[in-house]
Structures are given as C-alpha cells and as structure tokens.
Image (tube, rainbow, N blue to C red):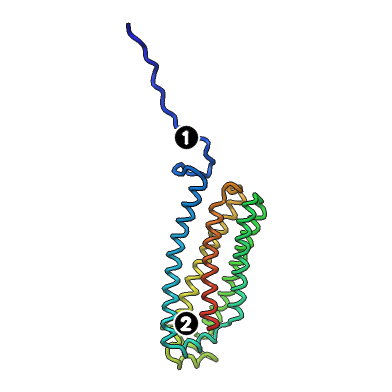
C-alpha cells in the first residue's frame, strides 16, 4: 500500500519578524547594534586623534627650536576672535548634547531645534575663521613660500622661521575647519532625519555618534586655541 507524503513547504524564517525597523538583521538586539556602532566610531576617532597629535608634536618641536619666532608670530593673531570661537564651540557642544537628551525623552521638536542651533553655531565659527584668514591674507601672510608680509606686519619678514609658524597655523586650523564642515553636514543630516521621524527614544544611535564626533572636534580646538593664540 502506497502512502502519500505531504508536499514540502518552504521554510520561512520568522526569527527577525519582531525586530524593530532600525535593527540590522546581523544584530540580535538594539543594544548590541549600538555598542558595535559606538566602537566603530571610537576606532575612527582614534585615527583623528592620531592625526592631530602628529600636528601637535610638529608644533611643539618647531616651537622648541624657534621660540622667539613663534612668540612674535603668535602675537599677531587676534586672541579675542579665538576666544569668541572657543565660546561658540563650547556652546555648540552643549546644544548637541541637548539634542541627544531631548531625543531620549522622545521630544523630537526640541531635538531638531538643538541640532539646528548646533549647526548655526558651527556656521558662526567658520565665519569668524573666514574673517581671521582674510585679515592675514590682506597683509601678505600666507602659508609656505607665499609668505610676504606687508604694511605693519612687514617686520615679520626679517624674523627667521616665522613662516614656519604660519604654515603650521594654517594647516592645523585648516584641517580643523574641514572637520567642522564635515560635522555640519552630519548635523544637518541628523536634523533632517529627526524631523522626518527617523529617531525616537528607542533609536537615536546616529545622533549620539554625531554628537561624539562633534565633541572631539570641539576638544581639538580647545587645544589649538591656547597653543596658537596664547602661548
């Protein structure tokens, strides 16, 4: 007697059916995904810290070799504008921290406002930096071989190794400015996504990682300001 076998049915994997939309299939929980993303961000930030550390070491070496030239050149920088920019970035660190706090409370509107405030403050920083750069370019203070001070700054041409200071100044602040621009792009993207409802108290990892990046950008400036403007 022949027996009929039931037709085979396709196996349907329902293991991830109850996962929230933000959870990638290769993670078992939101906590694991967050920890992995945060570790990845920290690894990236370590490379950024190494980059600026190399620049700080170069500054320290050249300053040790040529202290008089560095003191004379540093005195030509506007420490008041540098101080204003320091306050601006410190305030922006506070507003980006607020954006994380508010999204954790599921207050999307205030989180977006905080992100936009951070974006505006970053813009202020770059505008101030633009005027600083232009003030130097107008009197012939450029990096490298283009260094040719004129007017009241003409005396700098007679001081050996002053061009080294300004080359380091423009490189360090220029690279930092590029990081500010990148941060502004990320912050604008986070504000757009938050406004469209992509984040909540259950999922805000991208905002927190963007905030972490922004804090590092601010910390780098906290070191740049006294080294270039005050010491």
Q: Is the residue under label 2 in contact with that under label 1 (CB below 8 Å)?
A: no
* Location of mark 1 (residue): 15
* Residue 97: quarter of image: bottom right
* Residue 163: quarter of image: bottom left
Horizontal placement of 124 versus 159: left or right?
right
Q: Residues within 10 Å of mark 1 (few under 14, many from 20)?
A: few
Q: Position of residue 48 (x, y in %)?
A: 45, 66
Separation of marks 1 and 2 at Cα, in angstroms: 60 Å
Which residue is located at x 45 percent, y 67 percent? Answer: 49
Q: Position of residue 191 (x, y in %)?
A: 60, 55
Which dot marks residue 125? Answer: none
Which residue is located at x 49 percent, y 84 percent? Answer: 141
Residue extending farthest to the top is: 1
Q: Position of residue 100 (x, y in %)?
A: 60, 56
Q: Earlier in the sequence, mark 1 or mark 2?
A: 1
Q: Residues within 10 Å of mark 2 (few under 14, many from 20)?
A: many
Which residue is located at x 55 percent, y 68 percent? Answer: 218
For the residue pair 43 and 70, the one nearer the viewer reads as: 43
Q: Secondary structure at mark 2?
A: helix
Q: Position of residue 83 (x, y in %)?
A: 60, 77
Horizontal placement of 52 versus 121: left or right?
left
**Nearer the camera: disc 1 or disc 2:** 1
- Position of 228 relative to 194 (above/below): below
- Position of 206 relative to 140 (above/below): above
Tell me the quadrant of the picture where the N terminus can be found. Answer: top left
Which dot marks residue 166? Answer: 2
Which residue is located at x 50 percent, y 74 percent? Answer: 173
């Amino acid at each position: 007697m022949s027996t009929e076998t039931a037709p085979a049915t396709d196996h349907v994997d329902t293991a991830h059916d109850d996962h929230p939309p933000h959870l990638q299939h290769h993670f078992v929980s939101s906590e694991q995904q967050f920890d992995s993303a945060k570790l990845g961000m920290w690894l990236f930030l370590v490379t950024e810290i190494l980059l600026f550390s190399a620049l700080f070491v170069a500054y320290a070496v050249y300053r040790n070799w040529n202290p008089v030239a560095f003191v004379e050149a540093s005195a030509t920088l506007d420490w008041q504008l540098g101080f204003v920019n320091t306050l601006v970035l410190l305030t922006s660190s506070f507003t980006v921290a607020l954006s994380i706090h508010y999204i954790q409370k599921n207050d999307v509107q205030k989180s977006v406002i905080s992100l936009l405030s951070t974006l505006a403050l970053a813009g202020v920083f770059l505008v101030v930096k633009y005027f600083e750069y232009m003030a130097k370019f107008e009197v012939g203070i450029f990096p490298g071989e283009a260094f040719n001070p004129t007017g009241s700054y003409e005396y700098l041409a007679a001081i050996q190794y002053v061009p080294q200071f300004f080359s380091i100044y423009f490189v360090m602040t220029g690279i930092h400015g590029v990081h500010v621009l990148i941060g502004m792009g990320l912050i604008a993207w986070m504000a757009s996504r938050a406004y469209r409802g992509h984040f909540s108290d259950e999922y805000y990892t991208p905002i927190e990682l963007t905030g972490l990046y922004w804090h590092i950008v601010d910390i780098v400036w906290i070191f740049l300001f006294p080294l270039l403007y005050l010491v």
